[in-house]
Image (cartoon, helix red, strand yellow):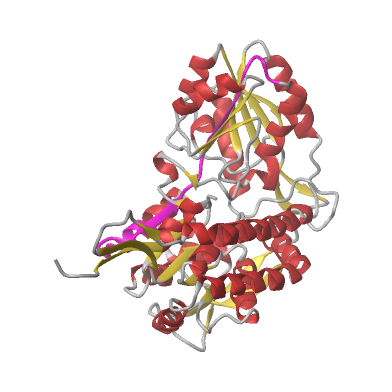
């Protein structure tokens, strides 16, 4: 989820320019100023959200409150924790329409997709709650006369979750719910592009009766975020964002010995085998590439098609991509919203141009666009035959771009799919389950789909390989980073 914060790797001056931060004269931070975060609508350009940013002096206060809350919370039963999270579900659902509207305004997500994110966050939270009893259960070892031996799941303490803007609710849920259920406190560092989505967690947990400081939301600059990461009162850091942002977080944590979990994006590949059902495959490929304007870590960006089907797939992708409707994200008919970040449409155009210069064919789009004179849109784009080593086929686009190449069969497809520094998801489009199973172990990705893409199942682990990062969220495995194992080794009698 990937461009979270190029900010973490930028200078303060650049960050301020991109985010619209303006100095306030009433207080001073370590740089001599306190900043106000102003967020513009990617469609209208108007300021739609404004808030103050955390000062360095507030870091200790925030973490102290979290640690105080966590000490008491760690002594509660799992039943009490589940009850809090279930009350939170009710409070969160009551805010569905308001949160959806704010999300559309702040990052440009079409309103129907924004509502979908809220509903998916609720469903994901419910499933994570359902996993908690087994995931956090005490493990009793085989009986040994005169001894009790158990493995307990103790909370790690205070978790810092640094959230990306593209799916700010879903990314936060992945960390907040397991952390709270495991007995931790959480500090949510909200996205600069969708800060309101971060605030909903602290406000609704408070409304649900959470102890003061258990779930807090902060807005902060690069320097203050680094202070949070380094702070000895933070026990675990979860980061979703760009590779540069992930490196910055690791640098900030260096020497602290605290664990850092990262998910740093993808260049996800699809392989359309010769036996694929094209009537089903083609619309799913386009949706997988262009949903959320392609601003998804697991969006399809590279499509390898068996040569016998290549002309039909290319024509079908162009036809379906052309049917997408750019427009006001609050309009129910809009299916392709504006690009969230101000600098990014030009970067997308440059990436497409590099693919064309390398030999690719531009079949649709490739340009920035406006609707009724408004918005920073990027037109749905289809490129065929860009060379595998071109930037278009290697660098994460994070936009509504589909790049296609023909392949002669499974061997070539697997080679090209694996030819990437990323490894989040990959998909195989086929009617042969046995062949999908045979190819599965050879594909270098955290998730391999068959006839599906761009989807997270809460009961399956969400992880990646290579430069995608080393974090694991969701499923019962997602609880592992929120606890530390604690052994009980009791001798019950002498001798």
Tell me if 167 is positioned left or right of 263 in this view.
Answer: right
- Whether residue 10 is visible, yes or no, is no
349 w.r.t. 308: above or below: below
Q: Quadrant of the C terminus?
A: bottom left
Q: Quadrant of residue 209?
A: bottom right
Q: Is residue 266 magenta?
A: yes
Between 495 and 346, the one nearer to me in the picture: 495
Residue 316 x/y as whole percent: 76, 24
Residue 427's spot in the image, x, y percent? 58, 31
Magenta residues (range): 249-276
Q: Residue at x 51, y 41 (%)?
A: 266
| Mark count | 0
Taking the spot 59% from the left edge, 59% from the top edge, the residue there is 130
- On whether residue 222 falls in the magenta region, the answer is no
Q: Residue at x 53, y 75 (%)?
A: 215
Quadrant of the rendered structure where residue 201 is?
A: bottom right
From the top left corner, tell me how far across and down residue 264 is, in percent. Answer: 47, 48
Viewer-proximal residue, 139 or 366? 139
Residue 150 appears in view: yes
Q: Is residue 126 above or below residue 402?
A: below
Residue at 61%, 35% in the rendered image: 300
């Amino acid at each position: 989820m990937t461009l979270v914060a190029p900010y973490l790797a930028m200078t303060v001056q650049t960050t301020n320019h991109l985010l619209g931060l303006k100095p306030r004269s009433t207080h001073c931070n370590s740089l001599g100023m306190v900043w106000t975060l102003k967020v513009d609508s990617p469609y209208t350009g108007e300021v739609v959200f404004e808030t103050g940013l955390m000062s360095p002096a507030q870091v200790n206060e925030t973490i102290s409150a979290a640690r105080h809350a966590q000490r008491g919370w760690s002594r509660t039963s799992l039943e009490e924790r589940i009850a809090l999270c279930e009350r939170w579900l009710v409070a969160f659902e009551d805010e569905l329409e308001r949160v959806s509207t704010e999300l559309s305004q702040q990052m440009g997500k079409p309103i129907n997709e924004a509502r979908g994110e809220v509903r998916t966050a609720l469903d994901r939270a419910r499933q994570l709650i359902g996993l908690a009893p087994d995931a956090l259960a005490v493990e009793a070892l085989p009986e040994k006369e005169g001894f009790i031996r158990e493995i307990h799941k103790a909370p790690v303490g205070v978790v810092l979750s640094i959230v990306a803007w593209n799916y700010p609710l879903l990314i936060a849920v992945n960390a907040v719910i397991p952390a709270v259920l495991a007995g931790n406190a959480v500090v949510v560092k909200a996205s600069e592009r969708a800060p309101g989505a971060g605030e909903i967690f602290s406000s609704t947990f408070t409304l649900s009766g959470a102890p003061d400081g258990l779930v807090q939301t902060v807005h902060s600059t690069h320097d203050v975020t680094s202070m949070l990461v380094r702070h000895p009162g933070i026990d675990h850091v979860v980061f979703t964002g760009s590779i540069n942002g992930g490196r910055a977080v690791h640098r900030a944590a260096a020497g602290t010995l605290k664990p850092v979990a990262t998910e740093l994006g993808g260049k996800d590949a699809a392989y359309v085998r010769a036996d694929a059902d094209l009537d089903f495959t083609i619309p799913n490929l386009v949706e997988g590439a262009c949903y959320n304007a392609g601003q998804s870590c697991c969006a399809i960006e590279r499509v390898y098609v068996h040569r016998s089907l290549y002309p039909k797939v290319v024509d079908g992708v162009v036809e379906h991509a052309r049917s997408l409707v750019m427009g006001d994200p609050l309009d129910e008919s809009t299916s392709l919203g504006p690009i969230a970040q101000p600098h990014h449409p030009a970067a997308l155009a440059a990436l497409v141009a590099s693919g064309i210069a390398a030999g690719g064919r531009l079949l649709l789009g490739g340009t920035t666009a406006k609707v009724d004179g408004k918005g920073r849109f990027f037109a749905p784009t289809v490129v065929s035959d860009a060379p595998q080593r071109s930037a278009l086929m290697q660098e994460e686009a994070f936009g509504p771009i589909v790049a296609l190449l023909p392949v002669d069969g499974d061997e070539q497809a697997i080679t090209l799919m694996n030819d990437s520094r990323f490894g989040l998801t990959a998909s195989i489009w086929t009617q042969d389950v046995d062949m999908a199973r045979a190819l599965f172990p050879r594909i270098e990705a955290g998730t391999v789909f068959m006839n599906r893409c761009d989807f997270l199942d809460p009961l399956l682990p969400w992880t990646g390989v290579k430069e995608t990062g080393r974090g694991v969220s969701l499923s019962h495995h997602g609880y592992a980073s929120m606890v530390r194992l604690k052994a009980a080794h009791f001798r019950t009698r002498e001798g």
